[in-house]
Amino acid sequence: MEFFDVGSAKKTDIKDRYDVIIIGGGPGGITAAIYAVQAGLKPLIIEKALDGGQMNNTQAVENWSGFSSISGMDLSEKMADHARAFDVPFAYNEVVDVELEGQEKAVILDNGKKLNSRVLIISTGSNPRDLGAKGEEQFKGKGISYCATCDGHFFADKHIAVIGGGNSALDESLYLSKMVRKITVVQNLAKLTADKLLQDKLNATGKVEYIYNSVVDSVEGDSQLSAISIRNVDSGNITRLPVEGMFVFIGLIPNSGFLKGKLKLNDFGYVPTDENMETEIEGIYAVGDVREKEVRQIVTAAADGAIAIYHAARSYFDE
């Protein structure tokens, strides 16, 4: 069985069985793979898209030790290269099903292949949450975006709306401020929840204004988005705001759909674990943004991966 390894641009021979299969190549999954090799285990990373996952959508990472600032894409590349230096194989496929009963676990790929392992680490991360506003689906890619790094350059010198008031929303707004003419931040609460440092940096651009206690009711336009209707959550009053683009950063949805009926999930779709990152099923671990936890950061995802392997190596391979 062979998969084309887009990272190293060469054919990677993928075996039918590994000690540890890691679903997802973000910081948690990559760290788990590196620690697995150091523990004498043979891991495999299965990634359906880009090495690094959601890190690729972050313009500047300023809280990863060793770098005062590094782009998410560069950090993703460095992490993946580190794993490859340890001879960690990558398979670029989507996992569509899992078999979790018994000592031997299995994953089924979108090409029908079945791979087995003693330990399975779920590191599938999460995706941006939709607004649910009228017209949102119609204007996705036609003025509505969920990734500033991907699409920001399309909105040079334009007036845009950013929906959300947390760290992600303001971090992406700061990036967008380098190219757009004006940013209107729409927040459903009475205040921002982002770190004060981010707020100060964004305010210093002189390009931002805020609308509080409000949500997007609908979006409109012809071939491209041209305006959004904003509803005040207290009064119910609706105001029309002409904009040439809208970026949405209102939270994440865990990529855990393939686990429904197979593994316990909380009400929001996150995977509960113990302090060792182990789920209710022995040998199954969850790390990073797909896991039920308080803080979702690159550093906490990496820590999750290290802890999971530390426990797994001593619990299932220390014979």
Image (cartoon, rainbow, N blue to C red):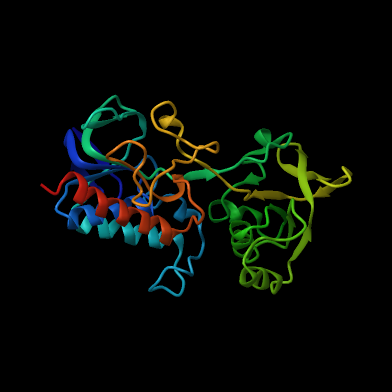
Quadrant holding the N terminus:
top left
The residue nearer to you, when weighing 273 against 297, is 273
**Is residue 156 shown above or below 249?**
below
Position of 21 compared to 238: left or right?
A: left
The residue nearer to you, when weighing 276 against 60, is 276
x%, y% of residue 257? 46, 32
Position of 19 compared to 149: left or right?
A: left
Q: Is residue 8 visible?
A: no
Residue at image coords 34%, 44%: 278
**Is residue 299 shown above or below 97?**
below
Residue at image coords 14%, 49%: 318
Which of the 4 image quarters holds residue 156? Answer: bottom right
Q: Is residue 55 visible?
A: yes
Residue at image coords 85%, 47%: 234
Position of 42 compared to 26: left or right?
A: left
x%, y% of residue 80? 31, 55
x%, y% of residue 45? 28, 45
x%, y% of residue 20? 23, 43
Q: Tally the marks.
A: 0
Q: Residue furthest left?
A: 319
